[in-house]
Image: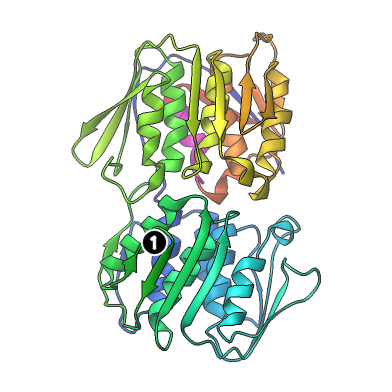
Amino acid sequence: MPRILLQKKQDIKECIINLPSSKSIANRVLLIQKLCKESFKIKNLSTANDTDIFREALALNSECIDIQDAGTACRFMVAYLSLQKGKYQLTGTERMQQRPIKPLVDALNSLGANIQYLNQEGFLPLVFNNSQINGGEVSIDASTSSQYISALLMIAPVLEGGLTIRFKEIVSRDYIEMTLEIMKHFGISFHASDDKIHIPQQEYKAQNISIESDWSSASYIFSISALIPNSRIQMNNLTVYSLQGDSVCSYISSLLGAETHLLGDNIAVRNEPNDSTFFEYDFKNCPDLVMTFAVLCALKNIKARFYNIDHLAHKESNRLLSLEMELAKINCSFTKSDNAWILIPSDFDKSKTIEINTHNDHRIAMAFAPLALVSNGVIFDDDTVVKKSFPNFWNEIEKCGLMSSVV
């Protein structure tokens, strides 16, 4: 794993960034494509590693499928394999085998699937044995991941009798809304309330679709803009009228010194003077943005409170622990107190080059990239980790005056 040094090389006030397309939308569309009886075209499909892994897995070219570290793909693949005749095994990386899957497996087994744990109950690897899944009604705990519900929703139309899903606590509810809107694009009707969604049995209708740019990836550009005085950065194929819940990034950024301006189907983010000393936000529905704004607050010396983020312990890394460890390197504390995580920044030695451990987590790497704007540089332990969602990240942020080199 090559280490990479990121440093500020020049002041660039204006540039155009090409964002990756949304892998969240792409992975949903890929599963629907497999479930649809007719073919349709997907334009601007994500090139993120997670999407590549999912495409290969959906081909079912092997009885043993390695989903590697692709979390969304894993949950969707569990639902898809429950529909298949034959025997399959689903495994993943060591970290993927530590991420919970039991609520989804329990729900599918209650519908007639035959899914067993190969090692530890509740975790990969899984074995699928000639499942005969039917429709009906399930209740599911989605307090760890909304992907359980999204996975069930997408296979619901092809189940005999359809499916009713009851749920209580949900994190990232906006991702469920995204799933339903994408299904609606492909002709699926549904009935939804606060604690229940019913999808009748029906067929997906083929419709061509173009995948919009990724708002989670855009958040790192917003953070960079907030730290470059008088900057104006354009991002293509990005709109505030988005399926993605992470488009709330536009509003959050406005609280921290980066304003959004509409440019047709694109947007520009402008640096705006901001003297805020305190920030708080409930990230229950947009957990992927926590890392971005935690680091930004630290770099702008803004005290902050982050609500409803405990489930970040179950992501690509334990993101709570990862943030706590890496923020400490810039003299910033990040600790749990009652119902929130508290961030308290302090001055740090900006003349030093700071080494950041990515913890094999793409979002940790990209969130800490703006640190190079206010320090003597940042060394990341793995330059390949960003391939998971934003393969061209290091090249794109060079347009903002940041230069990367392998060390």
Quadrant, the C terminus: top right
Percent of width and height locating residue 146: 51, 57
Residue under pointer 1:
179
Residue 95 falls in which quadrant of the image? bottom right
The residues colored magenta run 390-399
Mark 1 nearby-residue class (10 Å; few <14, some 14–19, many ≥20):
many
Lateral position of residue 252 relative to residue 85, left or right: left
The front one of 284 and 120 is 284
Lateral position of residue 210 relative to residue 132, left or right: left
The front one of 391 and 250 is 250
Kind of residue indicated by mark 1? Thr
Magenta span includes 6? no
At 62% across and 91% down in the image, what residue appears?
130
At 43% across and 20% down in the image, what residue appears?
256
Is the residue 298 above or below the residue 117 in the image? Answer: above
Lateral position of residue 369 relative to residue 200, left or right: right
- Residue 353 in sight in this render: no
At 60% across and 43% down in the image, what residue appears?
362
